[in-house]
Image: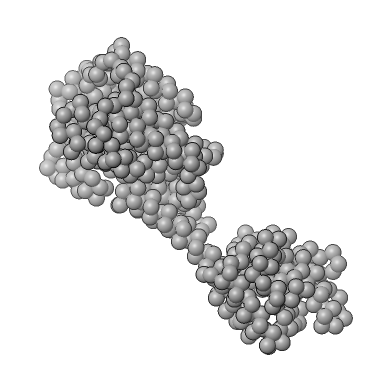
Amino acid sequence: LGPDSSLGPMIAATILPLAAGDTDTAIALAGMLALLVGLVTVGAGLGKLGFIADLLSNPVRTGYLAGLAVVIFIGQLPKLFGFSTDADSLADETVAFLQGLAEGLTNPWALGIGLLSLVIILGLKRVSPRTPGILIAVVSAIVVSMVLDLAARGVSVVGVLPQGFPVPSIPAVELSDIPLLLASAVGISLVAVGDTISTSGGFSRRAGYEVDGNQELVGIGSANLAAGMFSGFPVSTSGSRTAVSYQSGGKTQLTGLVAAGLVLLMLVFVPGLVQSMPQPVLAAVVITASISLFDVAELRRLYHVRRTEFALAVACALGVALLGVLQGIVVAVALSVAYIFKRAWQPYSTVLGKPEGVPGYHDRQHYPDARQIPGLLIVRWSAPLFFANAGLFRDRIRSLVKEADPPPLWVLVAAEPITDIDTTAGSMLTDLDLELNEAGIHLAFAEIQTSVRHAIVRYGLLETIDQGHLYPSVTEAVKAFRREVGESEADPGGDGAVPASSEVPPVSGS
């Protein structure tokens, strides 16, 4: 956690007009803004609003980190080459960087020390991963900077840090400024929460642990409360600092505490310790960290196993890179929700049959030789039935009935995957049952979940659909069909046949 470039413009746009050029007022306003952001995010966490994390799937997180990697990489290039740019977007940053190169703004000394740091960090990471390459690069750069006096050669250095430690206090601001600060705090909180949950989610997947969204909100809120008490301004998760910590081997919050302790000691006792550190070295550290964010292996895996999720990751990466971090997250979440809705709207459905030598009734797309019982059409619909797909279900049943040869006497729905039926779908089932009955076809259900059965009772569907045509398993329904139609042939599933719900579909299935 710390200062974040995505929050900088929002903070400045809020406090600068209110401060009217007064530095002390600006510091107080920034501190109060941090306190308000802390209250908003802590409140959101205590209110259990961390479910936002559930909307960020693995492809979304992978794409987010990939887009963030590109943004960080491009943003650090001017500093690596020894000059600065003033741009708000990736495109503007890229253009400004290229213009700087064309105008000859590159400082050879800055570029040299930056490239040397890159070689040290990346080289040691490859040949000796346990060696602290970042520390060696930083110390080496400071020594070179002092020996060659790089500051006199136009290389930007960190300089002497301000000495001392701020005293905790509650910022004093005008009451009339609070409404505007609170409105800005809500917007800043949205950006901070988006950054935090996306970044923590992406890194948690790599490290193999789970993220509690509510805990993340309380954590970032607590950090902002502390920042506001010590003359700070709103802070958020930094993808670049997180990447540096992760690449350096940091695994717990103790990493941040150690770093904070070291910074505190420097501020109090040796503020000039890093004054000769070249800024291009910091750019090199961040660039190497950004490279690790771009998970090429995961993107390649998504491309091979599921192209739609690969496209989702790419869309998220492009959204973050081209539109901005918050806008990119909004685009990614919207695409995720649309993708989920599409899968529910057009779910996988199939006809079941009895494969030779295999117990139970299975997907005929995976078992093309599975035998169908004459007069019995067994259909499985792998999604809830609701207003958006009720018409598709009806049309699917109609189409299968029309194509069946011989025409079915029963349509048996293997309903175990149907987790809900809304009122629109209930009305559709009533009409469909009446329509099939007119054609001499019975509509039956097997393996209906208890909650769905209760919904059917509430909707009054059993007044139309024969309650006797609700069966505990596909096997029992098949036996009932044979008894009702008077067929003497033995049940191909046998008495020991397992219901279709016990099927473990092949990897290639839906």
Residue found at x 50% / y 46%? 51
Q: Is residue 68 visible?
A: no
* 210 and 38: which is toward the camera: 38
Which quadrant of the rendered structure holds the N terminus? top left
* 31 and 150: which is toward the camera: 31
Q: Is residue 24 left or right of residue 130?
A: left
Residue found at x 24% / y 28%? 27
* 501 and 429: which is toward the camera: 429
Q: Quadrant of residue 367?
A: bottom right
Residue 18 in percent (x, y) is at: 19, 36
Q: Is residue 496 shown above or below 319?
A: below
Residue 133 in percent (x, y) is at: 39, 27
Q: Is residue 450 shown above or below 266?
A: below
Q: Is residue 485 left or right of residue 20?
A: right
* 148 and 345: which is toward the camera: 345
Q: Is residue 186 visible?
A: yes
Q: Quadrant of residue 485?
A: bottom right
Residue 219 in percent (x, y) is at: 45, 33
Residue found at x 64% / y 84%? 435
Q: Is residue 263 shown above or below 315?
A: above
Residue 274 in percent (x, y) is at: 28, 19
Residue found at x 39% / y 38%? 40
Q: Residue furthest top?
A: 269
Which quadrant of the rendered structure holds the C terminus? bottom right
